[in-house]
Amino acid sequence: MNRWDNISECLDSLHDTDNVSCEIIVVAYRFSTENLQRLRLTYPNVTIIESIETRGFSENNNLALRQAKGRYCFVINDDTIIKPNCISTLFDSFSKLSDNVAIVSPLILNTDGSVQWCGRAKIGFKDYMLGLIGYRKESSRKSIHTNGNGLFKTYNISGAAFLIRTDLFKEAGFFDEHYFFCPEDIALSTKLNNTGYECFVNTNAQIIHKGGITTSGKRSNMQLATTPVEHKGAAYFLSNNNKSKRYFVSLAISIGCFLKATKYLITSLRNGKDDRLFAKANFLASKYMFSSKSAKEIFIECTERYIQPKI
């Protein structure tokens, strides 16, 4: 995402982490000429894939994954800092587990050291709707799949960082490109679980995930494009690609987004422009739930209509 501060800190932490033999591939998404040249000069051993067209998380990652040569793929966001021995600890975990294990994830921390993700529970329609209306945050859910110690079985993963067997990733088709911005990671781990594989967490392997800053922060105007496609992706996932079921799921999410937008509109009278931005993003999400356009097409349309400056 053309954030030199992110990618340089991430790559520095990778070089410092341990002595695991690996190749490092960076998908330089819409990098400026200056940052692209800087990347080549500063990290000459890194393979760089230029990505110029509009692509989401799945498409951009798949550009690299299709040419990865290792037995395992360690997928990480650019806004992560890898703590010492993280990769080797994840790698060694596989030797202690059965052949049915596809993924081992690290403990993911916020910048202040608090826990961001320590495993993720199974996500269903009820869970999503409770989170949408603000009744319950996913990260606060209690589950047998979360907040364990050492090496424990989880259900879902965070796309910010996980180590996966390359053969099984390829078998799964890598990331599903129906999704543009969420929930590619949950879709992947759910698919693996449904085909008999397992996901684990090793809390002895740790990363810091800055979270939300790649697109300039959670209060960025980019929410006007990412919020609609996030919920569009959720409808696709929760309906399991069943058209009849997707109608009712989309209707419920649309109503939830409308109610959430109304709430933000009211609170904006007190809180100002941030809540007005959230209100508009959720109104757009409600509007686009029944659009025949793909998540990618919706992202492009919202970017052109509501984010890019008019000339």
Image: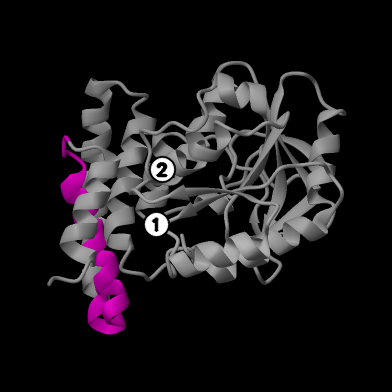
Q: Is residue 12 above or below residue 239?
A: below
**x%, y% of residue 18?**
85, 52
Question: For the residue carrying disc 1, how many other residues have a C-alpha within 10 Å: few (<14), some (14-19), or many (20+)?
Answer: few
Query: Which of the 4 image quarters holds residue 80?
Result: bottom right
The residue type indicated by label 1 comes to Gly
Query: Which residue shows up at 36% across the image and 39% down it?
Result: 234
Query: Which residue shows up at 40% across the image and 38% down it?
Result: 126
**x%, y% of residue 124?**
44, 34
**281 inside magenta stretch:** yes
Magenta extent:
268-292
Residue where numbered disc 2 is placed = 128
The residue type indicated by label 2 comes to Tyr
User: Closer to the camera, 247 or 188?
Assistant: 188
Query: What colour scheme does the image use?
Result: one colour
**x%, y% of residue 238?**
37, 31
Q: Secondary structure at mark 2?
A: helix
User: Closer to the camera, 147 or 242?
Assistant: 242
Q: Is residue 258 left or right of residue 108?
A: left
In the rendered image, the residue lying farthest to the left is 311
In the rendered image, the residue lying farthest to the top is 195
**37 inside magenta stretch:** no
Count of number-bearing discs: 2
N-terminal-most mark, 1 or 2: 2
The alpha-carbon separation of the residues under discs 1 and 2 comes to: 10 Å
Using the rendered image of the protein, determine whether residue 276 is visible from the camera's viewpoint.
yes
User: Closer to the camera, 127 or 204?
Assistant: 204
Q: Is residue 140 left or right of residue 94?
A: left
Using the rendered image of the protein, determine whether residue 81 is visible from the camera's viewpoint.
no
**x%, y% of residue 12?**
72, 63
For the stretch drawn in magenta, the main secondary structure is helix
Residue where numbered disc 1 is placed = 134
Q: Secondary structure at mark 1?
A: loop
